[in-house]
Amino acid sequence: LGQLTRCIRCPVAYHANDYCIPAGSVTLTDNNIVCPNHFTPRKGCRNHEHVNVSWCFVCSEGGSLLCCESCPAAFHRECLNIDMPEGSWYCNDCRAGKKPHYKEVVWVKVGRYRWWPAEVSNPKDIPENIVRMRHDVGEFPVLFFGSNDYLWTYQARVFPYMEGDANSKEKMGKGVDSTYKKALEEAAVRFKELQAEKELRQLQEDRQNHKKPPPYKHIKVNKPIGKVLIISADLSEIPRCNCKATDENPCGMDSECINRMLLYECHPQVCPAGERCQNQCFTKRQYCQVEIFRTLSRGWGLHCVHDIKKGGFVNEYVGEVIDEEECRARIKHAQENNIGNFYMLTLDKDRIIDAGPKGNEARFMNHSCQPNCETQKWTVNGDTRVGLFALTDIPAGTELTFNYNLECLGNGKTVCKCGASNCSGFLGVRPKNNPPSDDKGRKMKRKSQMKRKSQQEVIKEREDECFSCGDGGQVVSCKRPGCPKVYHADCLNLTKRPAGRWECPWHQCDLCGQEAASFCEMCPSSYCVEHRDGMLFISKLDGRLSCSEHDPCGPEPLEPGEIREYPPELMTTYPINFIRAAKTKSTTLNTTAVPQASSLPDAAPHVSFNVHIHVPG
């Protein structure tokens, strides 16, 4: 509810505040805007080119990626479990109309720089000289962390920052300087501040509006859907324990009831303890008293009204019991309609409990990497049912949590906000080990950390950008151990991705193709011991080994990865069949050539020679 402002060019409307109006909107009046959907990139403006990340948003690995046409998002088709689409493809967030907003931390791509953390700024809050810079509908200013510089950019060159991104290997790229480290630290702090503001604002709005949990139908037992069956065993098949009615606590938690040990619930007509049997929690629905409440950062939650002892039965997880086909259909529907809450729990290999549309209070129990409850699968009257049991003594008023142990679904990893000391940062990622408490343990921890650190210094991760042209996108990676370099297939003159253990051209001499011994650190030029003399130079400026094109002390040095372009009229085409293409365009191309194959006898050796093409100017 509230006042709406509408776009004059399309039928979209937003609440008239900075939290709802998308960044890049042009305000015309109090009730009229031009929304960012009407952005038109300027020809020749490099900062208006659409760029995608070189890793999958779900698994963080590279390879053949499905790239969104509207934002930098990229995914493996297998991670989304979809068929290869025809024509243009847009991610779920873009199809749902999700846009960047003011006071939001994002990753921004500028030219040859790595993805850099920044905050989306409102044009009302930035310096006047930045406002006067040329910008169009759909562009918004961002303030870079670390450098405090401003830039006007748009949706196709930014994606949202998530908790834990400061330590992400995909964002770090090759080499980290002090400015970038500072930017990561500032971004992490600012992200937490903005998250706290957003959560507090949401909590206040919910309380003001007396907001209730989302509607669902309360049920007491599982409801089968479609072809799914609820199993019911014959009394003769139900196991009988050895407890007696005269025992102090027959079939209780402290007893030696064989059924309880094997997670079988006793049947009232079979158990020798009769009415005194204490192992019928599911059948009698002996639940703990709980209350639904609104948490500060994780939506609705569940807390206990009274103390719960360790091992105590808290509640049963009930809902609609569906098969795998129905489960996939429901997940697909949720993704297409931008529904982010899932209540599905695996019952067995053929059945899943979905407590979304129908369930009980257990559906509100949040995830934690350090939970106080756990799920247990019990056999009740021949069928499998899921119960929630206390892992420790739980005082009254404590929030009840369990570890979801789920696989991530949708557009990417789901951030975990449990706040536990061993929090992994994302749902479905294994929690970190708790640090040992004794002195010996601390020494072992320090030792292991030092060992891991030294290993990280030796083993380099893959880079984000093509080493030949410097742009991101769909790349192929070198399979030589320790080599982090990636390339576009086009930059290598390849028509398809190389198969097997492919090694990049950085490891072969430009002149003879033998094993390279010296390399330019800023382009793929490399040379063997025999040919490296006079080809590479140690820069007087930064001490890096570089070829003549990239020597910063040279007359016209190129930036790392930059290629010197020449007008077509200055280039000459020679009718020679090259068997190994040059790695870069430069004033002199050194390569190996052979005569036409038809002119050689079957056993004739290849004849090698150097071809020098001198370009004027």
Image (cartoon, rainbow, N blue to C red):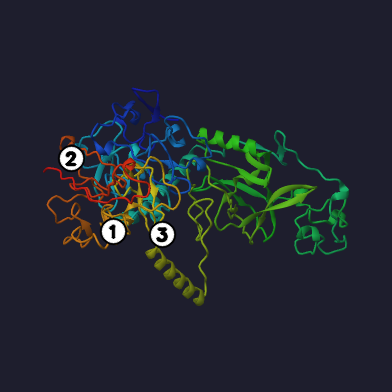
Specify the amino acid type for callout 1.
Asp
Mark 3 to mark 2: distance in Å? 36 Å
The residue lying toward the viewer, choosing from 605 and 98, is: 605
Residue indicated by mark 3: 481
Specify the amino acid type for callout 2.
Tyr
Disc 1, SS: loop
**What's the mark number on residue 566?**
2
Q: Nearer the viewer, mark 2 or mark 1?
A: 2
Q: Quadrant of residue 129?
A: top left
* Residue at x-position 41% and y-position 51%: 502
Q: Give percent across and percent down for residue 482.
A: 39, 60
Specify the amino acid type for callout 3.
Pro
**What's the mark number on residue 177?**
1
Q: Give percent across and percent down for residue 237.
A: 85, 50
The residue lying toward the viewer, choosing from 417 and 481, is: 481
Q: Note whether residue 340 is visible.
A: yes
The residue lying toward the viewer, choosing from 394 and 121, is: 121
Q: Give percent across and percent down for residue 387.
A: 69, 51
